[in-house]
Amino acid sequence: NPTFATGSTVTGSVAATTANTPPTALAAGESEDTFLSLYAGADVVLKQIPNNQKVILCDRLVYENYLTYLESFTADGGLKLLLGGIEFVTYRGIAIIPMDWGLYLDADFPHAATYLAAYPHRVIYTAFNNLTLALDSMSEYNKTEFWYNKDEQENRFRNQLKIGANYVHNKLMAVAY
């Protein structure tokens, strides 16, 4: 605890903090509350895009929670959309796609389990084509090799590339975790 002399003055600001606590299971219908919060709180730029041109990307736990919520109202889960011959569950006409990020984060960053564990319910609400996969063509780590394998009588090649994900416009995205 800090000690102050009599008559001294202290100035500063107060910051509210939340402890990093272990994740808890989603309450019944909590995913629908999250989707509503993102939908209602999104920037007006995202709201102007037709719902069939947007997507909700979410972790598997959020997706399963939403399916359970829908099944409590209809036997078949209802609210489905057909895009390119593939059926998607929707929220207000917006396709929902489960991403299984937790599985990949744990595999790629096992050391992160201690500080990412409190955020297992990730959701991204965005427009199609707002998220991109970019290639750093100028990276010194990029390498392409070609060779002919005489034993198998075939051409072979190997690419080593530096890539990453990014977004095009921040106003076309709302995120919850």
Image (cartoon, rainbow, N blue to C red):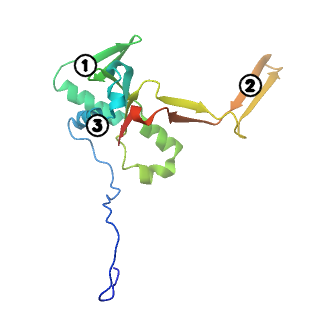
**Residue 28, quarter of the rendered image:** top left
**Residue 54, quarter of the rendered image:** top left
Instruction: Tell me the amino acid under the disc marked 1.
Output: Leu
Which residue was labeled with disc 3?
A: 41
Nearer-N-terminus badge (2/3)? 3
Q: Eyeballing the image, is 3 above or below 108?
A: below
Instruction: Tell me the amino acid under the disc marked 3.
Output: Gly
The 10 Å Cα crowd at callout 1, few under 14, some 14 to 19, many 20 or more, is some
Mark 1 and mark 2 in contact? Answer it, CB < 8 Å: no
Q: Which mark is residue 79?
A: 1
Q: CA distance from mark 3 to mark 1?
A: 22 Å
Looking at the image, which residue is at 22% across and 18% down?
Answer: 76
Q: Is residue 133 left or right of residue 29?
A: right
For discs 1 and 2, the disc positioned in front in the rendered view: 1
Looking at the image, which residue is at 43% across and 53% down?
Answer: 115
Which residue was labeled with disc 2?
A: 157
Q: CA distance from mark 2 to mark 3?
A: 48 Å
Give coordinates of residue 81: x percent, y percent.
31, 15
Nearer-N-terminus badge (3/1)? 3
Quadrant that contains the C terminus: top left
Q: Is residue 27 left or right of residue 87?
A: left
Q: How many marks?
A: 3
Local secondary structure at mark 2 = strand
Local secondary structure at mark 1 = loop
Depth check: give the residue in front, 158 or 164: 164
Give coordinates of residue 42: x percent, y percent.
32, 34
Residue projecting furthest to the left: 73
Looking at the image, which residue is at 34% across and 13% down?
Answer: 82
For discs 3 and 1, the disc positioned in front in the rendered view: 3
Looking at the image, which residue is at 21% across and 35% down?
Answer: 29
